[in-house]
Amino acid sequence: MTLNGWLQILLFCVIVIALVKPLGFFLTRLLSGERTFLSPVLGPVERGFYRLAGVKPDTDQHWTAYAGAVLVFNLVGFLFLYGLMRLQDVLPLNPQGFPAVSDHLAFNTAISFVTNTNWQSYAGETTMSHFTQMAGLTVQNFLSAATGIALAVAFIRGFVRRSARGIGNFWADVTRVTLYVLLPLSFLLALVFVWQGVPQTFAASATATTLEGTTQTIALGPVASQEAIKMLGTNGGGFFNANSAHPFENPTPLTNLLQMVAIFALGAALTNVFGRMAGDQRQGWAILAAMGVVFFVGVAVTYWAEAVGNPMLTALGLDPAMGNMEGKEVRFGISMSSLFAVVTTAASCGAVNAMHASFTALGGMIPLINMELGEVIVGGVGAGLYGMLLFAILAVFVAGLMVGRTPEYLGKKIEPREVKMTMLALLVLPLAMLTFTAIAVGLEDGLAGRLNQGPHGFVEILYAYTSATANNGSAFAGLTANTPFYNVTLGIAMFMGRFLMIVPMLAIAGSLAAKKAAPPSLGTFPTHGGLFVGLLVGTILIVGGLTFLPALALGPIVEHLAMLAGQTF
């Protein structure tokens, strides 16, 4: 580890924190239906969409209606994207002449992009046409991200409303987020990427002559526009197979920094939205502080593990100061590769600028743990906040049990119904992650996909189902996942991780919104201070440890011990 590396990490943190309040202020006004500085320009467009769709934006929806709208909206998106890929060979903007996508891969990819997972069992530059990339994948990058933010705000309304029947209007929420937030920011970020050298063209490829005199075909396409929303929407699906390690997706240190900031910016700002809507910004800062503690520990462990490297190589006489550079781009180095790995798995982004399978055992374990915890450290746009708030409900419930008092959060009593729904939502993730992993390691179809033997091969499979269920999309490179078995099972895991979690979450929001708020008393547990932050962090780590430690022991932990003993697989 170096001082320069830590200064770069600190710069990233400072920029993200500086963006929290201005973005939180704008999002709060926008999603409260108030006027913003973009209203004179975009207001008529917004109202035009409502008239065309027959939507009354001021109509409050009961949580069941809100959930129904989310499910129908995403079902239509899934069917459209699936059809687009299956008919790709007869649709326009296909200069490469790519054939139609197979049924099982189209099924997997459609679920992947609709659920904001963006898992890719294919190489983008050799599978998807320009039309599929733009009209299908990029569109879902916007809509799945907008859905996540809408869900987070609906959950917030459950905490802050008093004796209310509804939790907002999904159609208004998703329209406003797309029109006022994601589109303008993506446009500006795409222009910066083009300035830095990211291609934006309809050309199929370019031909270059190498130093040896041979020719090389270099894939091109509308990359910058997809790259911007890929990061802002915490989608992660790359135009190229190498994702953000590819020089056309991430050409410079500046684009690397901007991509990481874009991944965290909106998710971190939503904690401020929570505080503002609750009438006490300290509530939002407490949530962000809990996220920050877990995030910093993860960065420190990953950076240390990668900087130390593999002692087996040191024993061969190699310089230990070089650390572990396998699978990393020299232009980013160990510090920025480690930070990117933690950022992208702390959020449900899945973009990578280094190959996680090439990390040391402990360095690769942190991204895995981030996803197993539900990516509550900032998380995907919206998903991280409502995941953290579910843990907050569990934390105040535990605190209430310890003092023999009915737990409260923001004045709302947390009763058996809310606790049951919370546990149902939180148990969905380990259910899918561990069950599908167990099935895959017990079947020949599952074992056939791994590249490595031993604990590393086990982690390849565990990481895949963890990434899919957590709606992350990053991969532990080495697993051959483009098979009917993996495409179908990973698709089901993505569905479970997204929709089987949000339905009970919205049920909690509806239940809380209908309640009156109790005034604070001497027995009220404060939820804006260091004690609450510590309790929240402890709850997350205890639940995660009890659930996933056996699986981690079979994978990265035993691999690390084997490495120290000089054993390879």
Image (spheres, rainbow, N blue to C red):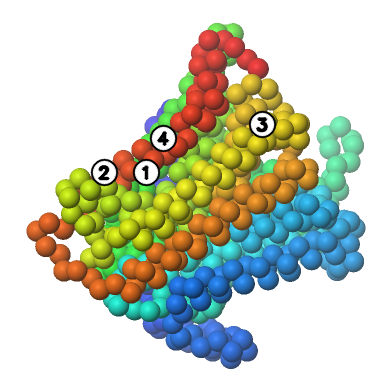
Give me the residue at 39% from left, 64% from top. 508
List the residue tagged with mark 4.
545
List the residue tagged with mark 2.
534
List the residue tagged with mark 3.
441
Could you tell me if the residues under marks 1 and 2 are in contact, i.e. CB atoms within 8 Å? Answer: no
With respect to residue 509, does 532 lie above or below? above
Picture coordinates of residue 563, whole percent (x, y): 55, 16
Question: Is 99 or 507 nearer to us in this picture?
Answer: 507
Number of numbered markers: 4
Q: Looking at the image, which residue sits at the far front?
A: 416
Q: Is residue 211 left or right of residue 117?
A: right
Identify residue type, mark 1: Ile
Q: How far is mark 1 from mark 2, CA to CA? A: 10 Å
List the residue tagged with mark 1.
540
Could you tell me if the residues under marks 3 and 2 are in contact, i.e. CB atoms within 8 Å? Answer: no
Identify residue type, mark 3: Val
Q: How far is mark 4 from mark 3, CA to CA? A: 22 Å
Q: Which marked residue is nearer to the observer: mark 1 or mark 2?
A: 1
Q: Which marked residue is nearer to the observer: mark 3 or mark 2?
A: 3
Identify residue type, mark 4: Gly
Identify residue type, mark 2: Gly
Circle 3 crowding by C-alpha within 10 Å: few under 14, some 14–19, many from 20: some
Give me the residue at 51% from left, 76% from top. 65
